[in-house]
């Protein structure tokens, strides 16, 4: 089986390419750095030629109001090229609870991506994952100020990027779901507590101040970033951190 992995040089994409090739399939990474641009369409036809499965692991360069346009344009180009190439399965990585936070530009953009995929001409699967453990540094940096970091007590169920890549690989190998597969980390924390554990695990002396208004996740209701019904991934936060 042949796989075209768009965003195949990114955090998740590179691991998915490695997984698939290690399993004996032929998987090629495509991204701007390999001469394929999902926005201009450059190189897309060649990238998809002969592919049985397309996996889209690209990401928008910003999380702001420009994000919906990134996913609208990229999905238009990708779906047209996939249809032309006769691709039989199109896999996208989305975010758990994405449809419950319309006030966040980035979440609206990902919902748009899912809707365009579901309405498109190619059988599909959507993997919805919780926040990556690797995302914690970005979250801490948003509201860091001197020796404090402000974080809300929003519940969160972080998942290791390697576990996300394994799940995407499994779904991409299988038949199209024409639906959603939800995955989450094995533990629920509040974000402020996760910040404290992270700083203390790294001997970082900064202090976490609980602030219900701080950062992007302040806008998120209590039950949105967690799901007891999701498939639980194996890696615990303490093991990832160490
Ligand atoms: N962060 C989270 O916690 C989280 C949770 C759930 C789901 N997700 C989803 O996971 C997906 C993958 O995220 P990630 O962290 O692995 O992304 P990432 O590391 O930022 O990688 C993004 C990839 O997209 C490529 N790319 C960007 N613009 C492109 C363009 N115009 N044309 C072609 N390729 C382009 C990049 O290639 P170049 O470097 O060559 O530009 C890179 O390979 C995203 O869609 C995100 O929404 C994230």
Image (cartoon, rainbow, N blue to C red):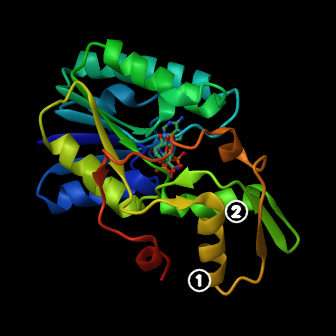
- For label 1, being within 8 Å of ligand 1 is answered no
Image: 69 above or below 204 = above
Q: Is residue 28 left or right of residue 217?
A: left
Q: Position of residue 66 (x, y in %)?
A: 68, 27
| Res. 38 in view | no
**Label 1 secondary element:** helix
Q: Position of residue 54 (x, y in %)?
A: 27, 34
Disc number at residue 138? none
> The N terminus lies in which quarter of the figure?
top left
Image: 160 above or below 71 = below
Q: Position of residue 198 (x, y in %)?
A: 60, 74
What residue is disc 1 on?
201
Residue under the image location 88 percent in, 71 percent down: 146
**Label 2 secondary element:** helix
Discs 2, 1 touching: Cβ within 8 Å:
no
Residue under the image location 39 percent in, 48 percent down: 8
Name the residue furthest right: 146
CA distance for labels 2 and 1: 14 Å
What residue is disc 2 on?
140
Category of crowding for the residue at label 2, using alpha-carbon neighbours closer than 10 angstroms: few (below 14), some (14–19), many (at least 20): many
Work out whether residue 84 or residue 142 is closer to the camera in this orientation and state it: 142
Work out whether residue 223 or residue 97 is closer to the camera in this orientation and state it: 223
- Give whichever of discs 2 and 1 has the lower sequence position: 2
Q: Is residue 133 left or right of residue 12?
A: right
Residue under the image location 77 percent in, 50 percent down: 214
| Res. 221 in view | yes
Q: Position of residue 39 (x, y in %)?
A: 53, 26
């Amino acid at each position: 089986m042949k796989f075209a992995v768009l965003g195949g040089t990114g955090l998740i994409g590179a691991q998915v390419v490695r997984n698939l090739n290690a399993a004996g399939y032929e998987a090629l990474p495509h991204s701007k750095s390999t001469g394929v641009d999902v926005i201009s369409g450059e190189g897309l036809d060649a990238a998809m030629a002969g592919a049985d499965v397309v996996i889209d692991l690209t990401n928008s360069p910003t999380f702001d109001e420009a994000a919906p346009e990134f996913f609208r344009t990229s999905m238009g180009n990708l779906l047209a090229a996939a249809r032309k190439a006769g691709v039989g399965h199109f896999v996208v990585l989305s975010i758990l609870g994405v449809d419950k936070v319309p006030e966040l530009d980035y979440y609206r953009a990902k919902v748009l991506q899912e809707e365009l995929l579901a309405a498109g001409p190619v059988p599909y699967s959507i993997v919805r994952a919780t926040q990556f453990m690797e995302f914690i540094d970005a979250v801490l940096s948003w509201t860091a100020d001197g020796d404090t970091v402000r974080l809300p007590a929003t519940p969160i169920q972080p998942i290791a990027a390697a576990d996300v890549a394994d799940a995407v690989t499994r779904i991409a190998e299988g038949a199209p779901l024409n639906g959603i597969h939800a995955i989450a980390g094995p533990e629920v924390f509040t974000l402020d507590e996760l910040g404290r554990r992270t700083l203390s695990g790294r001997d970082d002396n900064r202090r976490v101040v609980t602030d219900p208004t701080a950062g992007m996740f302040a806008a998120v209701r209590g039950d949105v970033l967690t799901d007891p019904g999701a498939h639980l991934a194996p890696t615990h936060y303490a093991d990832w951190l160490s």
